[in-house]
């Protein structure tokens, strides 16, 4: 055999907690998910939010606004 044992493997005497790194990963994942859902809602919106955004987007003045019925 061509193997030399330098030191025998031993189990660690004290375990290391993974709470802090796991908590950081969970918060990063939650933030990323919230950002993706927010962007998805913005980009899949079918109408305009305010009359001002309509005027800016269409580059035309908004003369009247009709209220939405049945929401």
Image (cartoon, helix red, strand yellow):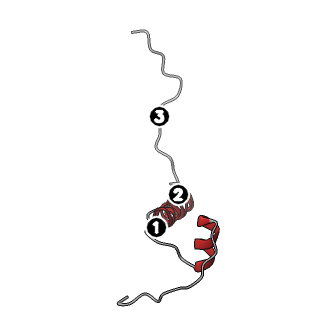
At which x and y percent is residue 47?
46, 72
Q: Earlier in the sequence, mark 1 or mark 3?
A: 3
Which quarter shows the N terminus? top left
Residue at the spot of label 2: 25
Residue at the spot of label 3: 9
Judge depth for marks 1 and 3 and give the one in front.
Answer: 1
Distance from disc 3 to disc 2, alpha carbons, whole Å, reads: 31 Å
Report the front residue among 33 and 26: 33
Residue at the spot of label 1: 41
At which x and y percent is residue 22?
51, 59
With respect to residue 69, does 1 lie above or below? above
Whether the residues at callouts 3 and 2 have beta carbons within 8 Å, the answer is: no
The residue at the far top in this view is: 2
Which residue appears at 62% of the width and 72% of the height?
A: 55
Judge depth for marks 3 and 2 and give the one in front.
Answer: 2
Which residue appears at 60% of the width and 82% of the height?
A: 63
Q: Earlier in the sequence, mark 3 or mark 2?
A: 3
Residue 71 position by quadrant: bottom left
Distance from disc 1 to disc 2, alpha carbons, whole Å, reads: 24 Å
Which residue appears at 60% of the width and 78% of the height?
A: 62
With respect to residue 71, does 53 lie above or below? above
Report the front residue among 45 and 61: 61
């Amino acid at each position: 055999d061509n193997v030399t044992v330098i030191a025998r493997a031993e189990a660690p005497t004290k375990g290391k907690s993974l709470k802090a790194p796991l908590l950081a990963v969970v918060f990063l994942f939650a933030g990323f998910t919230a950002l993706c859902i927010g962007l998805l809602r913005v980009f899949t919106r079918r109408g305009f939010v305010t009359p001002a955004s309509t005027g800016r987007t269409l580059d035309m003045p908004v003369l009247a606004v009709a209220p939405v019925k049945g929401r």
